[in-house]
Amino acid sequence: MIKPNTHFKVDVTINQVDFFNNNGYLSIDRITTDEEIEWLKQIYNKLFQERAGEEQGQYFDLGGPRAHTGQEVLPQVLGPENQFPELRETTFFKNAHTLAAKLLKVNQDNVNGGGHMILKPAKFGAETPWHQDEAYWNPSELPHRLSIWMPLDPATTNSGCMQFIPKSHKGEIRFHRHINNDPLIHGLVTDDLDPSQAVACPIPAAGATFHHCRTLHYAGPNTTTEVRRAYILVLGSPGKRLKKPLPRPWIDEEQEALAKLKSLAKPSNI
Ligand code: NI
């Protein structure tokens, strides 16, 4: 799998930067080349076929309880760049860094972060329910980050394109709970929103959507007969340390449930 040497530079206008800062999201039709997408698909498929990093917690079903053995509905690979460092040399990676710096209005030298991949299997891919990414994160930090979401397959409303609630990044973190109210399911959901305000952003493969870490977003189920692969980079500059951590009871619940699971798995001395 030799990485194609593609060159494609993308830029955003002042209007697009303003749009992002006012609305908390932005959509563009192309961030890399078709050639690079074809190469990325091979790496992507390999990571999911091998369930890469499962033992280290780097591969799991975002929409199902930990280590379940049923049909996977939302498998995810964390940190694919650790297994394939050449992912850091891609046109996608470079353009994502340039655009993240512009949209967040920070120096590109201060922009860092990593990626994850979410797969929606054909017909079985579950919805990614409404949430704010920041709800997953360290409550002691006020982050200055965004996500760049790039599909390797056409993202339509039927295959699970991204949807956003405009301007929601300007509000607070909403109350979240775990999917199915099961703290062993990593995926979070909030009910504190009006879905009729959602804006769907269908984009072609190699396009990208950007959203601020506080923007409410959703992706529908994949009801098509084709797989919907997405590669997401979360990039930003160092966050602000908070004196008092923000309340995140859903994180505490998950940690308690995982600790309980671990203690149950310990071999008995008797
Ligand atoms: Ni998200």
Image (cartoon, rainbow, N blue to C red):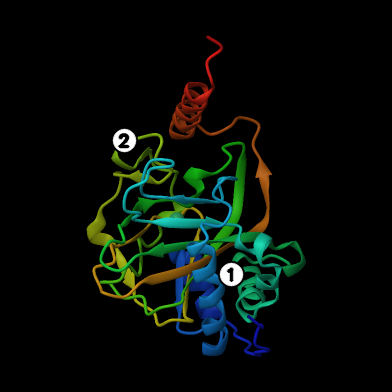
Q: Residue at x 77, y 66 (%)?
A: 109
Above or below, 216 against 90 in this view is above
Of mark 2 and mark 1, the one earlier in the sequence is 1
Image location of residue 140, percent across then percent down: 61, 36
Q: Nearer the viewer, residue 256 or 263?
A: 263
- In the displayed orientation, state which residue is furthest to the front: 270
Above or below, 266 against 165 in this view is above
Q: Residues within 10 Å of mark 1 (few under 14, many from 20)?
A: many
**Residue tagged by mark 2?**
181
- Figure quarter occupied by ligand 1: bottom left
Q: Secondary structure at mark 1?
A: helix
- Disc 2 marks which amino acid? Asn
**Residue tagged by mark 1?**
103
Name the image quarter holding the N terminus. Answer: bottom right
Q: Residue at x 58, y 40 (%)?
A: 138
Image location of residue 50, percent across then percent down: 52, 61
Q: Residue at x 54, y 64 (%)?
A: 47
Q: Residue at x 61, y 73 (%)?
A: 96
